[in-house]
Image (cartoon, rainbow, N blue to C red):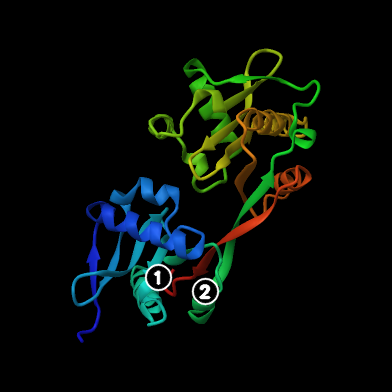
Amino acid sequence: MSDPELSTFASAEALAGEVTALNAACRLADGAEAFNEATMRSLAERSGVALRGPEGELLGLALVRQDGDVAHELELAVSPGARGRGHGRQLAETFLKDAEEAGRTARAWAHGDGSPARGLAEALGMREERLLLKLAATLDPSIHGLPQGGPRIVAFTMDRLDEVLEVNRRAFAHHPEQGSLDRDGFLARTREAWWSPERLLLAFSEDDRVIGFHWLKVTEEEAEVYVLAVDPATAGRGIGRALMHAGLAHLIEEAHERVVLYVEGDNTPAVKLYRSLGFEDAHRDVRWEYPARHS
């Protein structure tokens, strides 16, 4: 039997069907997708390496994007039926070598933080650099109903888009993905099957300015707190809690029983708010880092 073969590609767009199928297989096997939403939205911007068997079947895939001017960022998947043969290590070592030769820091996501991924990262000398928590809660009208008072909260209308984007920019100024949302990115999301303006709730100041929003995403699989953003100038006034209650009450009205969300592990105020509303750990995504020797 011939050895598996590595092949590089400049854009994953031509592999979209295989990427989607591999991602679905990983979700079934692991309970978490190997490639996140941002990656699946921008396959054309991902280069990488494919590992194929003797019949051309896809055994594993490493998708890479340039993270600013200093880093390469990896998402890696091995087909569930081809695991335990060293394919993941082979793909990861190829990625690390490429990053080192380019003089860039190597970063790699492990979605779900499973023990095989953690073991591989530690064996390669990588360090845990970023933690993204997925939290979940059972919806309960006695806990998640609408509070008394608070800001005026109504559904999104397109005439408020610029204000929403500005609040998002200010709230996520230091967030590597969400803070870069622009008009085109927003409009692309409105073309998704899950989009509904009724599920994007805006909070207003007394002088009718948008000061926060709660964006809900509902798919066949789950209901999600997609984005919760509050203008930093109004922090500490309970705007985020009021928006959370409004969004969760909306989901209860739609007869949803469970809701999930993602939050940075080091965002202490947000984690505290969510835990006070009954959210508990569902799984963890970890980003690992290996500094380039020539940086």
Residue flagged by tag 1: what amino acid is it?
A: Pro
Which residue is located at x 50 percent, y 45 percent?
A: 221
From this viewpoint, which residue is outermost toward the front? 255
SS for dot 2? loop
Where's the N terminus, which quadrant? bottom left
Nearest to N terminus: mark 1 or mark 2: 1
Give residue 58's quadrant in the image.
Answer: bottom left
Name the residue carrying label 2.
126
Point out residue 77 in the picture as x, y percentages from the top left corner.
Answer: 39, 66
Q: Secondary structure at mark 1?
A: helix
User: Residue 239's x, y, as percent?
Assistant: 72, 29
For mark 1, does the 10 Å Cα neighbourhood hold few (<14), some (14 to 19), or many (20 or more) residues?
A: some
Q: Is residue 18 above or below residue 216?
A: below
Q: Which residue type carries mark 2?
A: Met
Does residue 100 show up?
A: no
Image quarter hosting the C terminus? bottom left
Q: Which residue lies most toward the top here?
A: 207
x then y, percent, for residue 182: 44, 33
Q: CA distance from mark 1 to mark 2?
A: 24 Å
Question: Is 29 or 266 nearer to us in this picture?
Answer: 29
Whether residue 258 is visible here, answered yes or no, is yes
Q: In the rendered image of this protein, does residue 49 appear above or below residue 240?
A: below
Classify 10 Å Cα crowding around label 2: few (below 14), some (14-19), many (20 and above).
some
Residue at left 36%, top 71%?
95
Tag on residue 80?
1
Q: Residue at x 75, y 48 (%)?
A: 275
Q: Residue at x 49, y 15 (%)?
A: 159
Q: Are marks 1 and 2 in contact (CB under 8 Å)?
A: no
- Picture quadrant where residue 72 is located: bottom left
Q: Which disc, if any, is residue 14?
A: none
Residue 204 position in % (x across, y down): 66, 19
Q: Which quadrant of the structure image shows residue 94?
A: bottom left
